[in-house]
Amino acid sequence: MIRINLLAVERTAKKVPGVGVTAAQRVTIGAALILLSTLVTVGWWFWSLHTTSLRLDEEITKAETEAQQLRSVLAQVQKFETRKAVLQQRVTLIEQLRRGQSAPVHVLDEVSKAIPDRLWLVSMSQRDKDFAIDGRATSLTALSDFVANLESSSWFKRPVEIVDSQVDKTPQGDLVRFTIRATSQNPDAPPPPPPELWSTGPPAPPPPKPGVPGVPVNPQPPLPAT
């Protein structure tokens, strides 16, 4: 006789089946995790780039500010160096001329006073009362002022001639090379004597006047004898 346990079958049927994850769901979850990780990585990368860009902008701004300050300091240093060179040129020129004793002290002082800003002298030569002056200037206006100052001095005759002037282009700007000629004079010297006193001999006798006795006027030749 065969016996079948129906009670065990009923108990097994009443058990609640467990929840399972299918393969498609696993693929979906994996793709979502990969996508989320990619988004987080890309976001962090963009945030890092933005932070780096802001830091570089700040460094560039700081560097430009420092460069501007350095340019200002450099411009002042160049200005002082130029001023120093101009003064040194003046001192050297005056010392050379004074050692040579080839020009009056008054003329040297007048030349020194006539030098405007942004102009300096390179050489100065004298021949009798004529002076040839070579120099440099940063503008034609400075050269014109120098010539006008010399002409306004009582120690130089007018006009003061500009023999040559050339404008050279340099990284610092225009550089004017010039040569001028000036003739000196002494305003304290006594005036020259009048022309009639230049001759030291006795005055020449005046020409005879017509009708003076002893001097025939238009003498006629003698008539032939008959």
Image: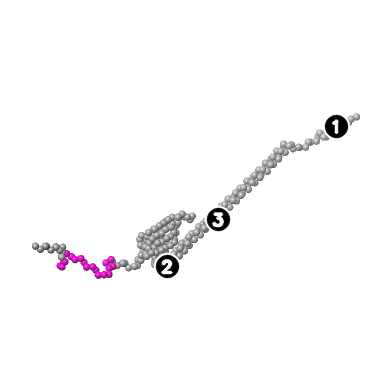
Rendering coords of residue 96 (x, y %): 44, 66
Q: Earlier in the sequence, mark 3 or mark 2?
A: 3
Q: Which mark is residue 220?
A: none
Rendering coords of residue 58 (x, y %): 58, 52
SS label for mark 1:
helix
Specify the farthest residue to the left.
Answer: 226
Q: Is residue 212 magenta?
A: yes
Indicate the amino acid at tag 3. Answer: Glu
Local packing at callout 2 (Cα closer than 10 Å; few below 14, some 14-19, many 20+) is few
User: Would residue 11 be found to the left or right of residue 39 on screen?
Assistant: right
Q: Which mark is residue 100?
A: 2
**3D distance between C-alphas at marks 3 and 2:** 50 Å
SS label for mark 2:
helix
Q: Earlier in the sequence, mark 3 or mark 1?
A: 1
Q: Nearer the viewer, residue 19 or 187?
A: 187
Front tag of 3 and 1? 3
Front tag of 3 and 2? 2
Rendering coords of residue 49 (x, y %): 62, 47
Q: Is residue 100 magenta?
A: no
**3D distance between C-alphas at marks 2 and 1:** 145 Å
SS label for mark 3:
helix
Magenta span: predominant SS is loop
- Magenta extent: 195-215
Local packing at callout 1 (Cα closer than 10 Å; few below 14, some 14-19, many 20+) is few
Picture quarter with the N terminus: top right
Q: Which residue is mark 3?
A: 66
Q: Are marks 3 and 1 in contact (CB under 8 Å)?
A: no
Residue in the picture at 50% in, 59% down? 78
Residue in the picture at 52% in, 56% down? 71
Q: Which residue is mark 1?
A: 6
